[in-house]
Amino acid sequence: MTKPRILFVDDEANVLNGLRRLLFAKRNDWDMQFAPSGAAALAIMAETPFDMIVSDMRMPSMDGAELLGEVMRLYPQTLRFILSGFSDDVSTTKALVRSHQLLSKPCDGKTLENRLERALAVRAHLKNESLRSVVGGLTTVPVLPKIYQQLTEALNRGETNDREIEAIVERQPILVARLLAVANSAFSGSMQSFTSAGQAIAYLGTNAVRYMALKCGMIGAMRHPTVGEFKAEAIVAHSGRVANIARLLAVRLGFDTLMVEETTVAGLLHDVGQLILMENFPDLYRDLPLPVVRNDRWLSSYERERLGASHAEVGAYVLASWGLSQWVIEAVLHHHEPAIAADIEVSPVSVVAMAERMASEPESKLTEIFGDALSPFGNTLHSLERDTRLQAAIEQARSPQPV
């Protein structure tokens, strides 16, 4: 079997040597190469393909965001990671748009190894021939909506202010309505009422808004918004609920601002595969019994038996082809797998898996659990054990579904 090929880029020789030492144990599993600059990295990639590139952000002549922008243009199938210790908002936004995942410096060897292994595992899963066959058979493949492209281009410039983002969003009244509905949800965790697009954008974050635009655009173009017991509007409402619960969990877990936003985005998009399959295979769901519709395990098994892939896998594949964040892709792929909620590494993946299960709880129970949603908690899942109501909900989310 061919080894995964990974290219590491940093202008400091001691950093590259440090990476060699950190990942020494993987030398027989990965084919690793090291480049001292962005230009050198592009020259190496012109000679041979790589599965993944991991670049420092701050480098002379060509910084990490610029390098990954070129890699995204020339080699879109290569996974793109940024290693950085920066805190500048402009740099963060540029890097987020051009990379699959940001890793903070300093990054210990085990964390780095784990993140890269997980990304490669997801990539390998999405290369499954049955899944490729299903995606290859789609007659209607969603295209990136114009407003999503406009927001992405604006953020990619790195100099966009909130007013410019708001002006783009306000051109789509339906998007504004959905943003306000999500921001004002009973489970948004905010004590204030949002009445304008600008307020909702400031609260949810520009990248969450960008992906809400993506989903709204997809639904607006659907020919089959209702198939049997499945309704696109209900799926959107559910995704907003999951996104808000995931956001509250992320805040309580002490995630930083970027990770809270990544978690929210993953919640918003976790069911995008359902919309894609509804549009392409409406007969698949037309006469499906309600018990199967409401049981995640039964539904996924039914989809795999009939098609060869589940809606979670199809959604992850399409989002990966669009270059979305690795966290989002992984969360979409695993959102119906409760064992992921017990992941030793608390991440958007495990949080969305928990939120998906908790979203089926009645509103009264969630209101009780999240009544003091923004109270400070520690930064590990273990610290949530202090809140017995939330811990009980998490344990229920981890437990297997009845069959």
Image (cartoon, rainbow, N blue to C red):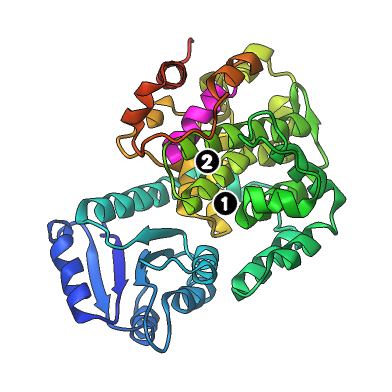
Measured as percent of width and height from the top left, residue 262 is found at 52, 49
CA neighbours of label 1 inside 10 A, class few (<14), some (14 to 19), many (20+): some
Query: Which stretch appears magenta?
Result: 349-359
Q: In this view of the protein, can residue 28 be seen by the observer?
A: yes
Measured as percent of width and height from the top left, residue 137 is found at 63, 47
Q: Residue furthest bottom?
A: 61
Name the amino acid, label 1.
Answer: Leu
In the displayed structure, 117 sits above or below 344; it is: below
User: Disc 2 or 1, which lies upstream in sequence?
Assistant: 1
Measured as percent of width and height from the top left, residue 259 is found at 47, 49
In the displayed structure, 231 sits above or below 132; it is: above
Name the amino acid, label 2.
Answer: Val
User: Residue 144 is drawn in which quadrant?
Assistant: bottom right
Asked if labels 1 and 2 touch by Cβ distance under 8 angstroms, the answer is yes
Q: Secondary structure at mark 1?
A: helix
Residue occupying image coordinates x 29% and y 60%: 4
| 282 horizontally vs 309: left or right | right
In the picture of the structure, the residue carrying the numbered disc 1 is 319
| 348 horizontally vs 228: left or right | left
Residue occupying image coordinates x 62% and y 41%: 268
Measured as percent of width and height from the top left, residue 270 is found at 58, 39
In the picture of the structure, the residue carrying the numbered disc 2 is 332
Residue occupying image coordinates x 38% and y 82%: 38
Answer whether residue 355 is magenta in the image: yes
Q: Secondary structure at mark 2?
A: helix
